[in-house]
């Protein structure tokens, strides 16, 4: 096994046998990045490694050809992402090292919020009379973005409060859009671009409380989708907090399909939260 530390935190990539993994201390899990030619024996080695690091979950988005391999290693299917691999679905496989991480403490409330979301499916209508300006973000916006994210999230599963992290993303493979009013950023969302597989993840959705329920995120996501269609992307998906009704409602309005729930998957606002999977072919 060899390892390389990330520059921005204590997380790092490593290899076990020939399989690349990401050790994610922030979310107390290991993600298997490269699953091709992986064996049950290698997967079990990864589980043992994660356990020695005191991590409680192992995850992998694999294609259908490897479903049985992960099942034989004790993984369960928590959901899927449509057309993730250049038109082929990804299966979201998970292994819980510690049993209590399987327990979904807000299950009833999350189901209620999901039903409310599904009831408004495909109801979004874009209006040209929108009074807030939406544009692509630039490096000079980063300080304002950090203020917005810090206001919206006490803790978050990625380094969105770090200026170097945001600059690195903006110059590499993430498209940020912001909404402004009187020259001030009031809302934002991003698309993480996977050019190899032609999918994009909608993430980092945030709005200041005073400007919520005004369609700001809906319009940002609509314009992100238009840009991604022009670039030839096939699949959009978003991993949204199951306990937050607003973002789930927005995604359902935009025609995203609910594809499962990742139980206790991310550390958000200081504790594990379950994450809804929403996906859409474009």
Image (tube, rainbow, N blue to C red):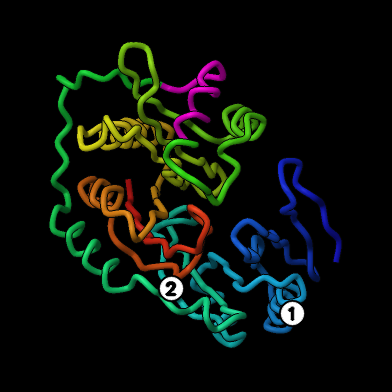
The spot of residue 250 in percent (x, y) is 25, 46
The reply, left or right, for residue 1 in relation to residue 227 is right
User: Going 69% across and 59% down the picture, which residue do you hit?
Assistant: 22
Q: Which residue is mark 2?
A: 78
Q: Secondary structure at mark 2?
A: strand
- Provide the residue span drawn in magenta: 136-149
Residue situated in front as seen by the camera: 91 or 76: 76
The reply, left or right, for residue 91 in relation to residue 28 is left
- The crowding category of the residue bearing disc 2, from other C-alpha atoms within 10 Å (few below 14, some 14 to 19, many at least 20), is some
Task: Measure the alpha-carbon separation of dots 1 and 2.
Answer: 21 Å
The spot of residue 123 in percent (x, y) is 13, 46
Where is the C terminus found, in terms of image quarters? Answer: top left
**In the displayed structure, would residue 182 be above or below residue 119?**
above
Residue situated in front as seen by the camera: 211 or 248: 211
Q: Which residue is mark 1?
A: 48
User: Going 62% across and 80% down the picture, which residue do you hit?
Assistant: 97
The earlier-in-sequence mark between 1 and 2 is 1
User: Going 53% across and 74% down the picture, which residue do you hit?
Assistant: 94
**In the displayed structure, would residue 280 be above or below residue 68?**
above
Residue situated in front as seen by the camera: 260 or 145: 145
**In the displayed structure, would residue 14 be above or below residue 162?**
below
The spot of residue 154 in percent (x, y) is 49, 46
């Amino acid at each position: 096994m060899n390892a390389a530390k990330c520059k921005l935190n204590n997380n790092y990539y490593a290899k076990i046998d020939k399989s690349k993994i990401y050790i994610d201390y922030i979310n107390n899990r290991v993600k298997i990045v490269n699953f091709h030619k992986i064996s049950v024996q290698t997967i079990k080695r990864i589980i043992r490694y994660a356990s020695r690091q005191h991590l409680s979950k192992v995850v992998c988005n694999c294609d259908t050809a490897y479903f049985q391999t992960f099942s034989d290693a004790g993984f369960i299917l928590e959901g899927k992402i449509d057309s993730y691999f250049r038109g082929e679905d990804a299966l979201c496989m998970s292994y819980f090292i510690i049993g209590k991480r399987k327990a979904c403490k807000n299950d009833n409330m999350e189901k209620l919020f999901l039903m409310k979301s599904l009831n408004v499916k495909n109801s979004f209508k874009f209006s040209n009379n929108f009074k807030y300006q939406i544009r692509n973000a630039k490096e000079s916006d980063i300080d304002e973005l950090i203020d917005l994210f810090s206001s919206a999230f006490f803790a978050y599963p990625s380094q969105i409060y770090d200026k170097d992290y945001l600059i690195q993303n903006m110059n590499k493979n993430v498209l940020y859009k912001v909404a402004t009013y009187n020259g001030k950023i009031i809302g934002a969302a991003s698309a993480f671009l996977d050019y190899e597989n032609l999918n994009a993840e909608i993430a980092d959705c945030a709005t200041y409380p005073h400007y919520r329920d005004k369609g700001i995120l809906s319009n940002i996501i609509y314009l992100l989708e238009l840009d991604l269609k022009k670039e030839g992307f096939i699949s959009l998906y978003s991993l949204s907090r199951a306990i937050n009704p607003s973002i789930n409602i927005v995604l359902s309005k935009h025609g995203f399909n609910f594809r499962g729930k990742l139980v206790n998957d991310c550390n958000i606002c200081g504790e594990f939260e379950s994450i809804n999977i929403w996906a859409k072919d474009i």
